[in-house]
Image: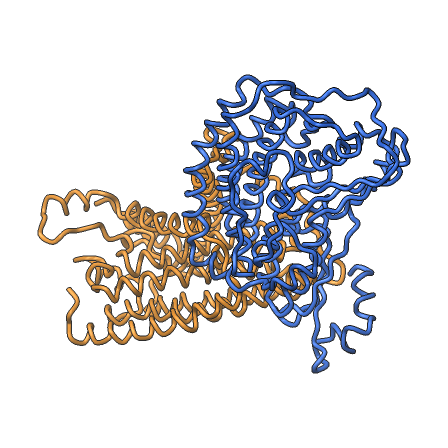
């Protein structure tokens, strides 16, 4: 089929006679899942080596949506490059922007006003809820249940409406700027968020009823895609993927930024190390996010929403790094500055890339259905992996 | 009350008076053929629309509502689209088998309609081994799927066909054993005998708990046999893109699609016939007035009402449950359903011998 398949067939890893079912012993079947495939949620290409239904090897091929965002950022100013980062992990664009803004602020040594800090955290958590909801629906759809998708989108729509009102966009928000946020919150913001919290609390229980307790669902998820704590750490997994394997890695707790050290919330850890544990981490995180928003929504301090910054930002010579917790894990921004108005080099550490690298280890020996289930719980966003 | 058999009798008498018996038989066959083909098409249209409406209702959507009043002509418009679409045959495919497979699937579905009693005395072919005929012919449908999967020269299709082969062959056992339970109770394989034996009450009520177990097993098994979710592994959309019909387009795809829906109709019709009394109205003991009112409803409405209720149940499954994995699917059959239905058959046999049923 594809040329890549031929290369794998020829490589020494596959036993001789690969693909030929008649020759005993080396019965192998190589199929390409993707780049166009309903379960990869984007243009991810997985080359799977099968023995019947059992998976022997999974090899992700990347680069189908590589837009050289890091290189583009080198020719954009410190105000401009944030807009590009919304297009990486488009489901947590707020948090991406936040990470970049934090890094620039670190370089400029700007103290951002408390109002902006609180708004940023609320926006981050709303984004996390929206992202987890999309993941929940899409993952249920991967497992063959279509209905949850629509139920998840119903609530996600409410968040998008709130975002639209304040940020003027529904997906690529570009709301965080160095020094604070771009504009003040809409007068309706607090009321609508509070309405949403009331609505959403009952809906999370509905999600549990619809999917979490389902026998078929549990059987599909439990014991599938096992990833031990050691493996999760050595593959560099972060976010819910690692927390499902009891590896504590929540940046919000370990290296608190903005007001995360002032709010009460738990770092969710599950001991199952399988797909179901990763699923439960995300479902429980939804409730934690709600808890954080509840604490902050009535306590948005008065004041400026943006610190005073120069029109043209120039970072001092040096290297700056900041990290934030996106819905998928740790997002790191590394800026090397030569003192000019544009960065010398920017490097993003995206959570999806590391999480995807653990897929092969997780899934060997499983069935095709397990691959889809495990991939669903990794919550991959392909533009985040390729950048 | 009103009976469609009067119409059929009139037509038969007229044909026999006008022509000699051979020609009359040929004309009858032609009429039946046209009826089956049009029923096939109409059922397809109705069921596709029904599925879309049911799914929309469960998914808090509106569903099709643009073409015609309340979107009633949506599936008609889809059919036109499929008709004018190019039917591609992929390179490297086995052309004969590839093009034959959809017809095998469709012909099987059509043949299955023969012994079904749509209304009182309105049956194409009341053969004395009706239930056996149905289970024999429905096993042929796997050949169409295997053909399609093998001939497509596509790895997804092959995997889908492989899965469906394992699945259909396994689940036929449970479906057959549950149907056998009713055959044991009735003492006849003929569909009309089975229906007439339920004149004083449907088997699901008369047969105590074993009949209910047989009914539930039957519904699960036929859902799997028709490749419907949660057992739609043969075409598992998120795993195998479209499984065995990945490479099909246009009308050839539509034939698979139609065959699937007509198969659903047929298995539900058989379920309704075996367990819910076919076209028999609902009677309660000696409530003369109530029974009389029930008798007033035409038998075809009883039959289609029961069948569409079962179809709704199967659609409900599809839009609620996630899909099983292949090993879980086979475990469910061989470790649970098959032993249960075997023991159940023994119970039913004992019950039938001891005349414990009503």
Indicate the chain coloured orange by its letter: B
The percent position of residue B139, horizontal first and vertical second, equals 48, 68
Residue at 51% across, 39% down: A264
Residue at 28% across, 67% down: B182
Outermost residue, bottom side: A24
Residue at 31% across, 65% down: B214
Residue A125 seen by the camera:
yes
Q: Is residue A89 above or below residue A245?
A: above
With B263 as the anchor, is A42 left or right in this view? right
Residue B235 seen by the camera:
no
With A286 as the anchor, is A248 left or right in this view? right
Residue at 70% across, 52% down: B88
The percent position of residue B175, horizontal first and vertical second, equals 39, 66
Q: Colour of chain A?
A: blue
Observer-nearest of A110 and A171:
A110
Q: Is residue B101 above or below residue B46?
A: below
Q: Answer with the quarter of the image where residue B143 lies.
A: bottom right
Q: Is residue B244 above or below residue A86?
A: below
């Amino acid at each position: 089929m594809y040329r890549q398949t031929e290369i794998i067939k020829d490589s020494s890893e596959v036993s001789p006679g690969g693909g030929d079912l008649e020759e005993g012993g080396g019965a192998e079947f190589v199929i390409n899942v993707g780049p166009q495939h309903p379960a990869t949620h984007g243009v991810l290409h997985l080359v799977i080596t099968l023995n019947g239904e059992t998976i022997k090897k999974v090899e992700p091929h990347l680069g189908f949506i590589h837009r050289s965002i890091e290189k583009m950022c080198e020719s954009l100013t410190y105000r401009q490059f944030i807009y590009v980062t919304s297009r990486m992990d488009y489901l947590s664009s707020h948090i991406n922007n936040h990470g970049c803004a934090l890094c620039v602020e670190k370089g400029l040594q700007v103290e951002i006003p408390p109002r902006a800090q609180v708004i940023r955290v609320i926006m981050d958590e709303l984004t996390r809820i929206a992202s987890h909801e999309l993941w929940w629906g899409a993952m249920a759809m991967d497992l063959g249940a279509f209905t949850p998708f629509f139920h998840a989108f119903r609530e996600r729509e409410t968040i998008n409406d709130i975002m639209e009102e304040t940020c003027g966009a529904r997906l690529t928000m570009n709301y965080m700027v160095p020094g604070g946020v771009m504009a003040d919150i809409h007068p309706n913001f607090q009321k609508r968020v509070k309405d949403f919290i009331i609505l959403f609390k009952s809906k999370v229980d509905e999600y549990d009823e619809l999917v979490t307790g389902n026998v078929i669902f549990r059987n599909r998820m439990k014991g599938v895609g096992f990833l031990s704590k050691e493996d999760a750490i050595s593959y560099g997994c972060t976010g819910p993927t690692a927390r499902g394997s009891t590896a504590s890695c929540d940046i919000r707790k370990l290296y608190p930024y903005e007001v995360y050290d002032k709010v009460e919330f738990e770092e969710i850890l599950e001991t199952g190390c399988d797909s179901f544990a990763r699923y439960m981490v995300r479902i429980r995180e939804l409730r934690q996010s709600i808890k954080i928003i509840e604490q902050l929504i009535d306590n948005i301090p008065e004041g400026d929403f943006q610190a005073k910054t120069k029109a043209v930002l120039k970072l001092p010579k040096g290297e700056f790094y900041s990290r934030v917790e996106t819905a998928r894990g740790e997002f790191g921004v590394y800026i090397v500055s030569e003192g000019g108005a544009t960065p010398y080099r920017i490097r993003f550490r995206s959570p999806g890339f590391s999480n995807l690298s653990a897929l092969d280890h997780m899934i060997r020996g499983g069935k095709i259905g397990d691959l889809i289930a495990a991939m669903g719980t990794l919550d991959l966003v392909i533009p985040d992996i390729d950048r | 009350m009103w009976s469609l058999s009067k119409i059929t009798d009139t037509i038969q008498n007229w044909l026999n008076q006008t022509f000699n018996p051979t020609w009359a038989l040929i004309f009858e066959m032609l009429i039946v053929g046209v009826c089956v083909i049009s029923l096939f098409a109409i059922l397809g249209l109705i069921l596709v629309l029904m599925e879309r409406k049911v799914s929309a209702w469960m998914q808090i959507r509106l569903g099709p509502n643009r073409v015609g009043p309340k979107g009633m002509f949506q599936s008609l418009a889809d059919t036109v689209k499929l008709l004018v679409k190019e039917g591609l045959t992929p390179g490297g495919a086995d052309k004969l088998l590839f093009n034959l497979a959809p017809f095998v699937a469709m012909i099987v579905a059509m043949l299955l309609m023969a012994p079904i009693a749509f209304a009182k005395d309105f049956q194409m072919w009341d053969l004395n081994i009706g239930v056996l005929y149905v289970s024999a012919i429905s096993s042929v449908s796997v050949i169409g799927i295997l053909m399609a999967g093998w001939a497509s020269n596509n790895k997804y299709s092959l995997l889908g066909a492989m899965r469906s082969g394992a699945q259909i062959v396994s689940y036929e056992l449970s479906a057959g054993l549950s149907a056998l339970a009713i055959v044991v109770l009735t003492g006849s394989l003929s569909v009309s005998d089975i229906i007439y034996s339920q004149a004083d009450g449907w088997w699901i009520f008369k047969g105590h708990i074993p009949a209910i177990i047989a009914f539930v097993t039957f519904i699960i098994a036929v859902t799997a046999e028709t490749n419907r979710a949660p057992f739609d592994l043969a075409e598992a959309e998120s795993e195998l893109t479209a499984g065995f019909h990945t490479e099909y387009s246009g009308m050839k795809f539509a034939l698979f699609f139609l065959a699937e829906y007509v198969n659903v109709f047929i298995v539900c019709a058989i379920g309704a016939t075996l367990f819910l009394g076919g076209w028999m109205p609902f009677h309660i003991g000696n409530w003369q007035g109530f029974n009389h009112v029930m008798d007033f409803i035409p038998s075809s409405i009883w039959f289609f009402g029961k069948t569409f209720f079962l179809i709704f149940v199967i659609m409900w499954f599809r839009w609620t449950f996630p899909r099983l994995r292949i090993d879980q699917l086979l475990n469910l059959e061989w470790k649970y359903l098959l032993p249960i239905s075997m023991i159940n058959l023994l119970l039913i046999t004992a019950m039938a011998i001891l005349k414990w049923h009503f």
